Image (cartoon, rainbow, N blue to C red):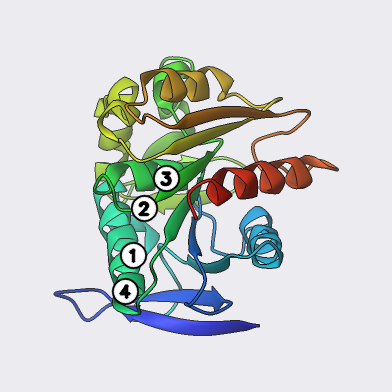
Amino acid sequence: MEKYITIPIPHSKKKIYAVRRGNFKKPVAVLVHGLSCTMNEHCLFNGSHFLETHGFSTLRFNLYDWHDDARKLHECDFTTYARDVETVVSYLRGKGVKKIFGVGHSFGGVSILYAKPNLFDAISLWDASNYATLPKGFEKKFTRIFHGKHLLRGNWDFVMNPKLLTQIETTDWKSLTSQFPTPTQVIVAGKGMLIKGGRQYFKNSSAVQKEFFVVKGAGHCFDEEGAEDQLFLATVKWFKKFV
């Protein structure tokens, strides 16, 4: 059963809007969504159900939300996302959860890597963004200035914080996992653009326990037939090593 909850953000009047599935007596997987997405993007929504049937409760949350007292996308950067990931984990620790795992899809994976090391018992990166391995200038060709913000041009337009674009350009992508000793699973989409980036994350990871897995035939959103099954099963097998 799912329950909607809010988590206060320290030193502010804002809240994190989240959904808990299961109870806090079990290990909990925290699911972090990608850029312009929500906690209900299908791989996270379906993943929360799959994880529950395999012994894990889940908590997925919005990094930004339509509620007046929630963060807005144009206000956020990787540092903001990371602090909110830390706030969610702190909330779970306060509820007595003993084992906490992190799942990050796309930008959600980077948000986890920007957070404090050793926050989780283990993490799984689902086709995590890595701009070091994409064509040079990739991020710029989708943007233009719009009222002092950056408008990301894709299938639809949305306004993003210029600080986030600066972080995309200046982040030392090669070293993100080299400073992250938490047991790390790197999963990449077999037909996606981030296989090279995923291999870089895996190779440079400082984690003693790490794993690399390719979801065959999958694109970045894992919405091809059978892709989610591969993704979820690999994640569950990885997390069960640390329960």
CB of mark 3 within 8 Å of CB of mark 2? no
The mark nearer the N terminus, 1 or 2, is 1
Neighbor class of circle 4 (other Cα within 10 Å; few <14, some 14-19, many 20+) is some
x and y, in percent, of residue 97 in the image: 39, 71
x and y, in percent, of residue 56 in the image: 58, 65
x and y, in percent, of residue 210 in the image: 46, 30
Q: Helix, strand, or loop for circle 2? A: loop
Report the mark closest to the observer, 3 or 2.
2
Residue lying furthest right in this view? Answer: 225
Q: Relative to 173, is 83 above or below?
A: below
- From the viewer's side, name the closer residue of 179 and 39: 179
Report whether residue 114 is seen. Answer: yes
* Residue annotated with mark 4: 91
Q: Helix, strand, or loop for circle 4? A: helix
Examine the image and state in which quarter residue 76 appears. Answer: bottom left
* Residue annotated with mark 2: 120
Report the mark closest to the observer, 3 or 4.
4
Neighbor class of circle 1 (other Cα within 10 Å; few <14, some 14-19, many 20+) is many
Q: CA gap, disc 1 to disc 4? A: 5 Å
Report whether residue 71 is seen. Answer: no
- From the viewer's side, name the closer residue of 135 and 103: 103
Q: CA gap, disc 1 to disc 2? A: 8 Å
CB of mark 1 within 8 Å of CB of mark 3? no
Horizontal side of residue 231 vs 29, given as left or right:
right
Residue at figure coordinates x 65%, y 27% from the top left: 192
As shown in the figure, which amino acid type bears the numbered disc 4?
A: Tyr
As shown in the figure, which amino acid type bears the numbered disc 2?
A: Phe
CB of mark 4 within 8 Å of CB of mark 2? no
CB of mark 1 within 8 Å of CB of mark 4? yes
The mark nearer the N terminus, 3 or 2, is 2
Horizontal side of residue 211 vs 165, given as left or right:
right
As shown in the figure, which amino acid type bears the numbered disc 3?
A: Leu
